Amino acid sequence: MLRLTNLKIINLCSNSFSGVIPRDIGHLTKLEQLQLHINKFKGTIPSSLMNCTILVKLILRVNALQGNISTLDFSRLVRLQTLDLGNNYFTGNLPKSLFSCKSLTAIRVAINKLSGQISPNIATLPSLTFLSLSNNSFMNISGALTILSSCKNLASLTMPKNFYKELLPQEKSFIGPDGFRNLQALALGGCSFTGQVPEWLANIKSLEVLDLSFNELTGTIPGWFGSLPSIFYLDLSMNSLTGKFPVQLNRLPAMISVKAANKLKRTYLELPVFVAPNSANNHQYNQLGMLPTAIYFKGNRLTGTIPAEISRLQNLYVLDLSMNGFSGSIPSDFSNLTSLEVLDLSQNNLSGEIPTSLQSLNFLSEFNVSYNNLEGRILTGGQFGTFGESSYVGNPGLCGEILHKSCITRSSTVGHDSGKEYKKPFLDGLTVGIATVFVAVVAVQAFRLKNIFYC
């Protein structure tokens, strides 16, 4: 292949190629694209590659490459637009010479062994729109955010699993109205950040996707989230947030109607993002607009009743309020969430019956109310005929064929759904204790899963 000196594109992705990248690859001086991702290549990046001075795209992610990338000289690759070195074993930091590549639009070095601080020189890349630094050991989150907020065209910034246990900057003036002026996606999950949900986020009016999951944030969920005109994906799961569900979220335009959501920017990402919502399975997205409209508040310390006002969010696809301390009943108005596909209310202190009105949710594919204090007959109409026992366990007052428990009638308690009467078990108090232990176990297990945006 090295004799094909007129070769412009090499794309060998998604095979099982192994060995090293040929050290003489620099002989291909007309090469514009080198795509070797998702293989088993090992060794280092040959220094001769820097002789391919008209290279536009270099994608080497998901291999077993190693070496200190700080020593590489990218200064001659003046046409380079896309650099993807993710999922390898590289050490060092972003090379200083990389900042000479003024045509760069996308950089991914996620899931490596990089360390140090973000260089101020990255702000000199005028076309940078995509940056993924996830799963490394970068330090100084305050400095990183200050520098990157000056990248005028930055649209997607993912930095989960870095800056371990640092304090997330708080004050609203930290990032002013001119910072991150075009930022659409910000992912800072899995860093064990301390502090509260930062006020400066309220200044980023272009924000569509926010992931602050798997941190140690405290305080309440601020009501000003309801003033962000473009946000449609909000993940605050697995923190230590307290207080009630902010009813101001019912004002979010992109979650209220499809028409408002369609007005958001539908630009394609220079590199795909990989998302793992509450599972270990990866989902690839090439456009932010393809992400589901979602609220993930799982695994916090939220209390009070679940407000019926949530039912205004008729464009909502996912609502996950599991592993909290919500009490009261499930709002019957949730039947207005006509786009809902996932509803998880498990491991709370909810009581009463499952509203029959939920049977009108025709797109519901996942439903979980396990480990609450619910009672009455399990629904069977509509999509509810597809949900198994795991959706209901831990509610001694529930009955139905799925739970292998008949609905015994008594004159003392009347069920709202069928007009029949139900016996309320004496084990309700014990169930709360068991559920509490279960929550602790599941919380440990959940932390082992990948956070939402990991590269």
Image: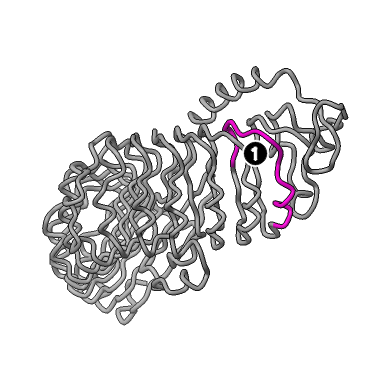
Image mark count? 1
Which residue shows up at 63% across the image and 42% down it? Answer: 330
x, y (%) of residue 392? Answer: 70, 36
**Residue at the location (25% across, 45% down)?**
114
| Residue positioned 32% across, 56% down in the render | 85
Magenta span includes 353: yes
Q: What element carries label 1?
A: loop
Q: How is the image coloured?
A: one colour
Q: Which amino acid does label 1 sit on?
A: Val
Q: Is residue 313 above or below residue 223?
A: below
245 within the magenta span: no
Crowdedness near tag 1: few (<14), some (14–19) or many (≥20) residues, C-alpha within 10 Å: many
Span highlighted in magenta in the image: 345-360
Looking at the image, residue 119 sits to the left or right of residue 353; the answer is left
Q: Nearer the viewer, residue 312 or 452?
A: 312
Residue 70 in view in this figure: no
**Which residue reaches farthest bottom?**
6
Q: Which of 171 and 81 is in front in this view?
A: 171
Residue 327, by quadrant, is top right
* Horizontal side of residue 393 vs 65, given as left or right: right
Residue 266 sits above or below residue 358 on the image: below
Q: Name the residue beneath numbered marker 1.
A: 369
Q: Is residue 428 left or right of residue 11?
A: right
**Residue 247 in picture, x, y percent from top left:** 45, 49
Question: x, y percentage for residue 120?
Answer: 11, 56
Q: In which quarter of the image is the N terminus?
A: bottom left
- Can residue 439 be seen here? yes
Q: Could you say where residue 155 lies in the image, as x and y percent from the top left?
A: 30, 65
Q: Is residue 337 left or right of residue 2?
A: right
